[in-house]
Every structure is written in structure tokens, then in C-alpha cells.
Image (cartoon, helix red, strand yellow):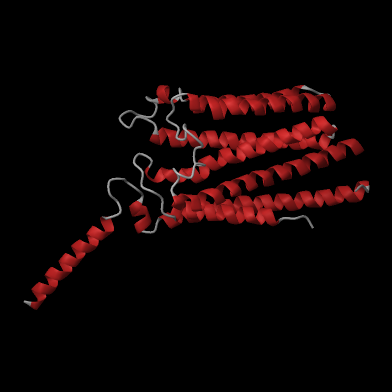
């Protein structure tokens, strides 16, 4: 029997997040109001994305070391689910932003011009586009070994580019996004202790959910690979 | 007379009570009505239902893939 305890942990943590995230007390902050609870969900998406991309690049390096195609399958699926969580993070951020950053005297559409200049938004969009290009690159190479090798190298480049585009450049520029002066939400001085009770379990839960979904895709991918090589 | 005093004290008590209940909500608007009449639990229930559905689906997928893996192992005789 496979070890499934972490899947149960994932379900327990996320159920706790959903209940606690909506019902537990949070600090009353102007402008943010009740949307402060988005911290449990929106930031969780990015944490999950970052974790999955990190595993993906580790698998890419492993493939380059050992040229075992299983590592390539893993690297590919971790990047795919990471991108899914990245898109979710972006979409949730867009919703949140349009209610908190937008000028309350104008409709959200009118302040779009100012919001679209947000360095954090542009950086995240660039990072996601680079990962989209990774899948285009994979799809365009027919030879399995060549595809695995080239996309592993590209994966390392894409991961390296994550750092300037979402971690460094947005902090060098003026931004409405919180956390420009340090690690947003990680810095325990600016997160209310009541929120940390839910925040950390939420992150672990989301990361585990991402890994779970990816593990299913990897197992299917390996099965497909076996079928192809035996028929 | 007694009735008047009673009426006065109850009104005063009610005012104090209402002052207490408004105390936490200074200037910042929060979803206090949603919470006080309990409707927030409806939202939680809906979210939990959706989440349970997704998890159920994931578990089913997990089981199916395990079955496929077992069949594949028996067929090819590897591992």
C-alpha cells in the first residue's frame, strides 16, 4: 500500500482553511475590510506555484544528470500544474485588486490604466508567459530525447527568470502590492497572529493539493509511456 | 411607578447592550450583519461542499490510476 497520509493531511488542512479562513477573527483594516481573508487563498496559489516550479527544475536537472525519461515526465507535469496555480493566483489577484486598488470614485475600468502599470502584475505575467513558451517548445520537438534535453535546459532558464521577474524587479519599483520592503506575508511582524493560525496551514494545504494533482498526472504519464514502449 | 422604572431600566440596558454590540465595529466596515444573522455559515457550507466534491473526484481518479498501474504491472511483468 502506498503512503497516503499526506493526502489526508491535505484535505484536513484545506477544510480547516475554508472554515477558519471565513469564520475566524481577522484584523479590521481600512480599504481591505473583509477581503483580508483573501490572503489565505490568493497567496496560497503563489506559494503552491513556486513550490511546483522548484520541484520541476530539480527534476529537469536530474534528467540532465541521468537521462532517465521519468524525470522528464515529472518535470513537465510539475511545470504544468505550477502554471495552473500561477494562473489561478493571477486571476484571484486581479479580482482582489479591482476591489481594493481601484479608485473608489471611478469605475474599475477607468483606473485600469494605472493598475496595468503595476510592476508585480507585469512581472508575474512575464514569468507565466515564459512558462507558456516552455510548453510550446516541448510541443514543437518530435524526438523524445531531444525534447527532454532541450526543455530541461529551457526549464532551468525559465526558473532562473522567475527571480528577477516576480521577486526582484517588483520590489525595486513603486508598487501598490504589499510586501515591497521584505517578504510579503512571510514577515511575521506584519501579519496578525490571529491570521497566522490559518495562514501557515493554508499554505501547506495548497502545496500538498498541487503535489497531489501533479502526482496523478505523472502516474498517468508514466503509464502512457509504458504502453507506448510495449506496443 | 414600578412599571415606569422597569421600562426605564430596560431601555437603558438595551442602549448599553447596543453600545456593546457596536463597540468592535469602529470605522472599518466588515461583514458583521452576515456574521450576526448566521448567513456566513451558508457560504462556508457551499465552499465545503464544492471542496468535498473536488476531493471526491481526486480520490476516484487516484484509485483508477492505481488500478491501471496494477493491470500494467501484471501485463508487462515488470518491477
Q: Dividing the picture into quarters, in which one does residue B18 lie? A: bottom left
Quadrant of the rendered image containing residue A64? top right
Could you tell me how many numbered marks the image carries? 0
Q: Is residue A113 above or below residue A95?
A: above
In screen coordinates, is B38 left or right of A82? left
Q: Is residue A147 left or right of residue B76?
A: left
Q: Extreme left residue here?
A: B1
Image x and y of residue A190, in percent: 44, 43
On screen, residue A80 above or below A33: above
At a point 79% along the width and 58% down the height, the residue shown is A1
Viewer can see residue A231:
no
In the picture, measured across the screen, residue A5 lies left or right of residue A227, that is: left
Q: Specify whether residue B78 is in view.
A: yes
Q: Position of residue A116 (x, y in %)?
A: 46, 24
Residue A56 in percent (x, y) is at 71, 35
Q: Residue furthest right?
A: B77
Q: Quadrant of the C terminus of chain A?
A: top right
Q: Nearer the viewer, residue A17 or A84?
A: A17
Residue at the image position 75 percent from the left and 35 percent from the top: A59
Image position, residue A203 (x, y; %): 57, 46
Residue drawn 79% across the image and 36% down it: A71
Q: Is residue A110 above or below residue A80?
A: above
Query: Which residue sits at x=75%, y=38%?
Result: A74
Amino acid at each position: 500500500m502506498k503512503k497516503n497520509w499526506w493526502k489526508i493531511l491535505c484535505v484536513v488542512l484545506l477544510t480547516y482553511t475554508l472554515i477558519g479562513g471565513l469564520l475566524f477573527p481577522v484584523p479590521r483594516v481600512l480599504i481591505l475590510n473583509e477581503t483580508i481573508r483573501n490572503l489565505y487563498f490568493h497567496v496560497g496559489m503563489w506559494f503552491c506555484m513556486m513550490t511546483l516550479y522548484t520541484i520541476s527544475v530539480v527534476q529537469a536537472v536530474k534528467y540532465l544528470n541521468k537521462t532517465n525519461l521519468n524525470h522528464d515526465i515529472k518535470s513537465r507535469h510539475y511545470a504544468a500544474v505550477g502554471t495552473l496555480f500561477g494562473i489561478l493566483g493571477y486571476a484571484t489577484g486581479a479580482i482582489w485588486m479591482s476591489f481594493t486598488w481601484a479608485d473608489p470614485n471611478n469605475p474599475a475600468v477607468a483606473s485600469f490604466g494605472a493598475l496595468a502599470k503595476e510592476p508585480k502584475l507585469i512581472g508575474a505575467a512575464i514569468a507565466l508567459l515564459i512558462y507558456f513558451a516552455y510548453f510550446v517548445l516541448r510541443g514543437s520537438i518530435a524526438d523524445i530525447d531531444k525534447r527532454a534535453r532541450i526543455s530541461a535546459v529551457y526549464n532551468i532558464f525559465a526558473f532562473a527568470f522567475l527571480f528577477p521577474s516576480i521577486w526582484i524587479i517588483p520590489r525595486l519599483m513603486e508598487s501598490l502590492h504589499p510586501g515591497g520592503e521584505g517578504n510579503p506575508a512571510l514577515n511575521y511582524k506584519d501579519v496578525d497572529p490571529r491570521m497566522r493560525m490559518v495562514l501557515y496551514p493554508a499554505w501547506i494545504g495548497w502545496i500538498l493539493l498541487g503535489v497531489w494533482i501533479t502526482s496523478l498526472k505523472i502516474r498517468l504519464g508514466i503509464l502512457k509511456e509504458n504502453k507506448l514502449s510495449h506496443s | 411607578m414600578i412599571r415606569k422604572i422597569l421600562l426605564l431600566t430596560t431601555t437603558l440596558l438595551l442602549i448599553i447592550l447596543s453600545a456593546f454590540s457596536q463597540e468592535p465595529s469602529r470605522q472599518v466596515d466588515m461583514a458583521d450583519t452576515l456574521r450576526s444573522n448566521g448567513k456566513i455559515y451558508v457560504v462556508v457550507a457551499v465552499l465545503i461542499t464544492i471542496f468535498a466534491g473536488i476531493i471526491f473526484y481526486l480520490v476516484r481518479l487516484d484509485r483508477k490510476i492505481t488500478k491501471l498501474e496494477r493491470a500494467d504491472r501484471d501485463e508487462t511483468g515488470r518491477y
